[in-house]
Image: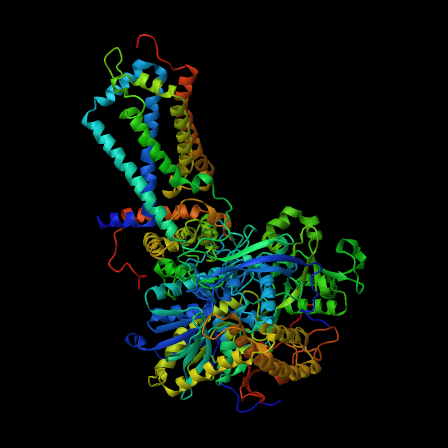
Amino acid sequence: MSAQQSGHQGHSTMKVTLHVWRQKDARDPGRMVGYPNVECSPDMSFLEMLDVLNERLMEKGEEPIAFDSDCREGICGACSLTVNGIPHGPRKGTTVCQLHMRSFEDGAELFIEPWRAKAFPVLRDLVVDRSAFDRIIEAGGFVSVRAGGCPDGNAIPVPKEEADQAMDAAACIGCGACVAACPNAAAMLFVGAKISHLRHLPQGQAEQKRRAQAMVDQMDSEGFGNCSNYLECEAVCPKEISVKVIAEMNRDYLSASLTREEQKNDGGGAG
Amino acid sequence: MSADGPLLDGRCPTGPIETRWERCKAELKLVNPANKRKYKVLVVGTGLAGASAAATLAELGYQVHAFCFQDSPRRAHSIAAQGGINAAKNYQNDGDSVWRLFHDTIKGGDFRARESNVHRLAECSRNIIDQCVAQGVPFAREYGGLLDNRSFGGSQVSRTFYARGQTGQQLLIGAYQALARQIGLRRVKMSPRTEMLDVVVVNGVARGIVVRDLVSGKVETHAGDAVVLATGGYGNVFFLSTNAKGCNVTATWRAHKKGAFFANPCYTQIHPTCIPVSGDHQSKLTLMSESLRNDGRIWVPKTKGDARGPDQIPEDERDYYLERRYPSYGNLAPRDIASRSAKYACDEGRGVGPGGLGVYLDFSDAIKRLSEPVIRERYGNLFEMYERITGENPYRVPMRIYPAVHYTMGGLWVDYHLMSNLPGLFVLGEANFSDHGANRLGASALMQGLADGYFVIPYTLGHFFASTKQEKVTTDHPEFKKALADTNAYVARLLAVNGKRTVDSFHKELGKLLWDKVGMARDRAGLQETLKRIPELREEFWKNVFVPGSGEALNQSLEKAGRVADFLEFAELLAADALEREESCGGHFRTEYQTADGEAVRNDEKFCYVAAWEWKGDGKPAALHQEALNYEFVHLATRSYK
Amino acid sequence: MSWVCRLYRSSLGAKYVMASTGVLLLGFLIAHLLGNLQMFAGADAVNSYAESLRALGPLLWVARIGLLVIAGVHIVTALRLAKANEAARPVAYVKQASRQVKPQTKTMVLSGLVILGYVVYHLAHFTWGFVLHDYSTLVDTEGRHDVYSMVVYGFQCWWVSASYLVALALLALHLCHGITSAFQTFGLNHAKYATAIKLTGPAIATLLFLGYASIPVACWLGIVQILEGT
């Protein structure tokens, strides 16, 4: 048989003990629930281990643990678990969907919690609402162009170094690990990354100041914390985005605050 | 089987190919700017096609309400595309042109795509790059500051634009930002974590949708003047694919059940270089860039069941089967050939790794020839990704790869205007069938999604509004009430089964069945067996599935259950289409139709058409409608990569 | 001036305030250290320096009030930020961990408040004369306030010196983080200078610590002592 799925079960197995945050809905206060001796294979991804646990729970007629995931290859930014206090778990530069059980010892005890921040309310179990990030982008995280009528792609040369810096920042997957890791639950790395991405390209520079002001103001109104330069965001970012982007945001916001005259219809993008 | 009813009319313009789109645009009716805001468009799906369409339509002044099941439009699966986006810019001065891109795409699609559509796609490709650059997409640049290109399979020019290995992500962020801007301006209302469960048809026109709020569980209806589906492909019918976990056929399938024809479902693309399955727990497959085949050599042991490690197998006991069978292309043979050859090697029992489902992709010669740092420079991040997933170091041990379902060329049938046979229902991107024929070339999916959204739908939708007179409907209309009640009943039915098996166990069983019989190589007996087996599995599903929890809350099992229920119906159509198409072409390979040395044999005389299927009701076979494919500009020829 | 209020109320504005007041306070620390180091130049130098400061008259008060306002704004803003930061995470992690949070960063508010307490004590001790002795009666041979003797007497008490050193250490930790952060806050970050900027905080903090600590140490070692006849 040529079954793709008939690959035999991994050669070795291991057991882990889980403590998972369970919360019925946004109003429920929630609590940690223990799941001792969960069997898994070192070849499983962390989320596959949870899949297997969920199958077991359902076979017993229990409700599975809800968690967000989609692409499971580290690019969509949906997965959002804090493992033993570290967003996305112990492996540097790796989303939790790409984390494999071989990163843990047999018999390990793992605490799995949702992103915790006022701006990211828990919807259920490990699922949080990150729409605050979308609202920050809606406030100004774009270049105001319409489809059609754009100049030729090569009309404005962009130095490679600048394009590379823009790309470094644009690699952000919007997962929110920076907020989850920051002792202040600040969103500086996320907002800084977007501002940095667009400020390094000539196309984004026309709105550089307005963008910084609009995005930071929206960030503040969402209830994120402030930057204390812990640098924890940079340390957990699965795309390893540098806090340099925060400095760039600080620079843009300062210069915007000191030099830019506010426009009447500052709220939205230029029609 | 012969077609039911007259040939379908794709509303393609006539005349010289390079003037067709211009002429079409000139003849399209327009909506007065002041009137645009009176029209409401419902856009489902916010990947490249959906986000670009929603943003562009809102820029024009239409009221737009967009929906996606993800928690943010930025997470749609377009984000995972790695390689790049094609455009006939000819920045490299290497002889590229719109004509050549058109020609390559028609040939790559194995002569099963519409010429008019593909030419339009090639024309729009140039505007896409300009548009994306203006939006701030950080494409790779040369030191002089101009855009860089790379070459990609299936073409002899360098026309692929890229942003490191994250082109899909960057293009999606561009489209998402354009959409976000319109949301900020209150011209688009965005409903994330909302899944479409039905289309509402009033007087034969698609006028609304039924959605379920995935957080509160509330089922609601929305009325509009047109419905745009941009909900991606159905690769997850195989359970394991490179698609995101959430990708599903539900939106297009429910539209199909409301009258939209489903075209060419049997065209599924299988990507040769994915990381093999490691066990039963496997939840999805990860694609590795095809560029690896530039320096890696693919081999399996010559003898069956050789259990030695790769370093123990001497050179003369290795079979570099692609180099042996396709000496001129070698390891760079096209995707379908490379995939099928791997399958054959494993079927013969010569596969490697767990379960014998893998072949080696060996870099040791390249490392010897070029040195490890050079290989690291070229493929460092891919090697790292491989190591992260498998725990093996590919600098020391050959990689193991195996094919996986990657993209689906089939989809809802649309005409040249991207409107389905159900008036008012437009279908964009991977969700439609239109531009890739039987096989998609690399770096073309992003191109199609954005062309549809930025540059086609804004014109053709206006024409639809301007040329059809419609009365206003609201969600108080009886059809809406009925659709709402039906959907609520459907959700309740899923929850009420209360059986013993989990949703995933059904999905895995269905996937395995399809992969075995309707995967890389198909035959009559296998397809017939599958067609018998699927209804049985479906029946068991409705008797024995267990969906825990309630409908009035965030319930991921319930979401999955609805999707799997639809896959269980859709799979039957996929197999039926594969059975009906008695030829091998592109992503559809029938073992009965091959040459003595295993090459695909197309049958242009009998099958040079689009197979568009009409839903006839539960338990009844779908009716086939045909759209003739005429090749006036690129002459029918056999692909050969020997 | 509504934009000033808007700026101050914003998260980044508060950081600019923290950084700029911090830099001004650092300026004071440096000036104060330069004054103190005149201890090594002998009683006459210190006492005449102190006298010249007093001679500034109203200007001295301007400087004092300015300093007080700067310190006040620094502290009030810090507390405001701390409160907002606490509110940003209403539910704490059950399992707490971090990859690179450093103790000096985590304790900025605490070290700041301890330093504040110490400064009050320091003023009470040397300026207001509430602690131990009233030094205001010390007068040198030229009839000037004898700051030199005051310092030497002060540091002769072991716990005065010890608490001084402890406070200095906290101040140094506070500055390690604060100075480097100020660069970041003003957007002064560049790959080429990243290492230099990272080291600036610890370097200045160390220099200040050594400079300030040298005086009590010199008093103990007798390098600085009360000379006969003063």
Image quadrant containing the C terminus of chain B = bottom right
On the question of residue B417 being in view, the answer is no
Image position of B571 (left or right of B207): right
Picture coordinates of residue A257, whole percent (x, y): 29, 48
Q: Quadrant of residue B350?
A: bottom right
Q: Quadrant of residue A154?
A: bottom left
Picture coordinates of residue B277, whole percent (x, y): 66, 64
Residue furthest left in the image: C58
Above or below — where is A243 with respect to B49?
A: above
Image position of B396 (left or right of A80): right
Frontmost residue, B4 versus B574: B574
Frontmost residue, B203 versus B339: B203
Image quadrant containing the N terminus of chain B = bottom right
Picture coordinates of residue C101, whole percent (x, y): 47, 44
Frontmost residue, C20 versus B329: C20
Image position of B529 (left or right of B47): right
Coloured how? rainbow
Above or below — where is B123 with respect to B575?
A: above
Image position of A20 (left or right of B353): left
Picture coordinates of residue B20, whole percent (x, y): 45, 77
